[in-house]
Amino acid sequence: MSSIQFFKNGKIFPADGQNKEADAMIVCNGKVSWIGKEENIPPVEGVKIDLEGRRVLPGFIDAHLHPLMLAETSKQISCTPPGVKSIADMVQALKKLIKGQGPDSWMEGWGYDEGKLDEGRTPDRHDLDQAAKDVPIVLTRTCTHIISVNSKALEIAGITKATPDPPGGKIERDEQGEPTGVLRESAADLVKSKIPVKSLEGKAALLAEYSDTFLAKGITGITEMMGDHNPIDYYDIYRAAVNKGMKQRAALYYNWGEFQRLELNDPSIFDSERPVYIAGIKLFADGSISGQTAWVNPAFVGDEKNYGISTTSREELLAAGKAAKKYGIQLAVHAMGEQAIDQVVDTFYKKADWLAGAPSVRVEHASLPTERALRRAAESGIAFVTQPIFLYAEIESYLNHLGEERSRKSYPVKTILEKGIQVAFSSDAPATAWGDPVNPFVGLEAAVNRKAYDCTDIGREQSIPIETAVELYTKAAQAVTRIPCVGRLAPGYHADFIVLEKDIFEADKAEISSMIVEETYMGGKMVYKKTKV
């Protein structure tokens, strides 16, 4: 028995080239069967739903984020403003939480950015020892590439003066060569590998619970960009989360090292028609700009010898690309600095062609692309997945590490589009210094205004129209992620859409970040409704 719904009296933005604007839509068995002007609607019998003249957009697809990490950090100490403005605030928050903790517990915090702290520096083991010396403490920097730990955590991990820097990582040391408790890139894994692991059921429950937060932001499609196999396989976690009520369609990208450990005999794990599927392989070519580990050129401001960290090789990139081609999936490579982006683009110049109708290679973040990289990426069909929220939320670190002119020229979205490169927007949540890191409207405002949260000009010449920005979070995000039949409202597509309290296309540019989702639909079914106060 078919289920038919007739949505009318709306201001529908289909994000589809055939229809610029519509006011009515027919949904049959969860998919759009017709969309257009109500006066032209074909005869229909079904449930009629009045949209009350409100703005309707396709559901957002976050093309690069870390949902499981986001769900986990929502339960940790938040080290971001307005609650935490200094290292002293962190210490006090930790002291309060540590009371009553058992001797085998670990204390975790999330989201600090030294550029926003009163002390203007990274917390170290001496700071965290003030909170506790007998309980291990791990605070993750907003970029996720750096952690700060106390002496107990260093002791448990066996990190001493004699411990060498691991490949692709750095143990920060004081003048005497002693570890400071700040661990960069792969060095962080020395401690993180010692943290007790939650059960599969526990992780799945966290994801299912966080699903409602995604829906409240209008997010109906997600990507997991840090898929692991050990100690618990992420594919199993996400499938269990669906059984527990997670609504979002999910595309998983596995870290290259973990992907090589997977059992790959069942082709259904790559089936994009499933609610959860493996979409690609993930590699890192460098670190972060805010953490001064991105592989840049020229060097970071104030340190002419610091060009960041290169974390992969041409040989490793080609090996991962070969595997991606074999299994018909994508290769996604984190690259922020000029040298890292050049390395990825040059490695796959005119070789990124194994997928039909979609980019075979994605450059994640693409913060500082060179003219050469832009030209070669366009010629090779390499896509860029970027995050407008970075400059908006982390302006202090960018100015400190890149300077004003270079910061303004970073994330040149308008130029990237003009070059003909496929682009998708995303949040990289929770890896940004913002209290609400996954909110698409913050990224949309940043892309349209090119102003930071403190109104600093971050390159107005690279601003784009709001309609284009919305498409980069919907239609274009689908084209890059390959989650099928989403991202637009057109016949044959899933009826995944959101209803806004205000019209985003008529609002003042400075009000975009405060947009409120009143209702979210998936498959034509309302899965979220804002509670009226």
Image (cartoon, rainbow, N blue to C red):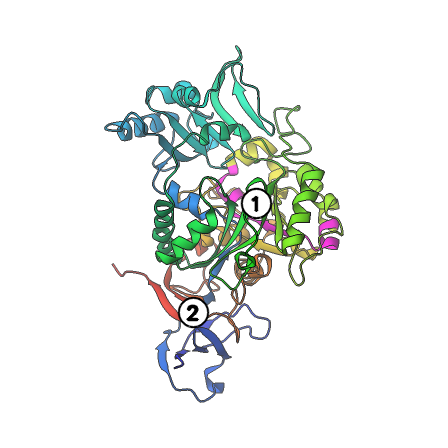
The outermost residue toward the top is 176
Q: From which residue to which does the magenta span run? A: 376-395
Query: Residue 432 or 190: which is nearer the viewer?
Result: 190
Residue type, mark 1 in image? Phe
The outermost residue toward the left is 100
Tell me if residue 86 can be seen: yes
Who's the residue at 36% across and 67% down the image?
526
The answer to whether mark 1 and mark 2 are in CB contact below 8 A is no
**Left/right of residue 14 with respect to residue 204 in the rendered view:** right
Residue type, mark 2 in image? Gly
**Residue 226's x, y, as percent?**
51, 44
Q: Within 10 angstroms of label 2, few (less than 14), some, or many (20 or more) residues?
A: some
Q: Is residue 76 above or below residue 357?
A: above
Who's the residue at 23% across and 28% down the image?
100
Callout in the foreground (1, 2) = 1
The residue identified by callout 2 is 523
Quarter-wise, where is residue 518 in the image?
A: bottom left
**Residue 76's x, y, as percent?**
35, 37
Q: Within 10 angstroms of label 1, few (less than 14), some, or many (20 or more) residues?
A: many
The residue identified by callout 1 is 259
**Residue 45's x, y, as percent?**
39, 86
Q: Determine which of the numbered discs, if any, sits on residue 383 in the image.
A: none
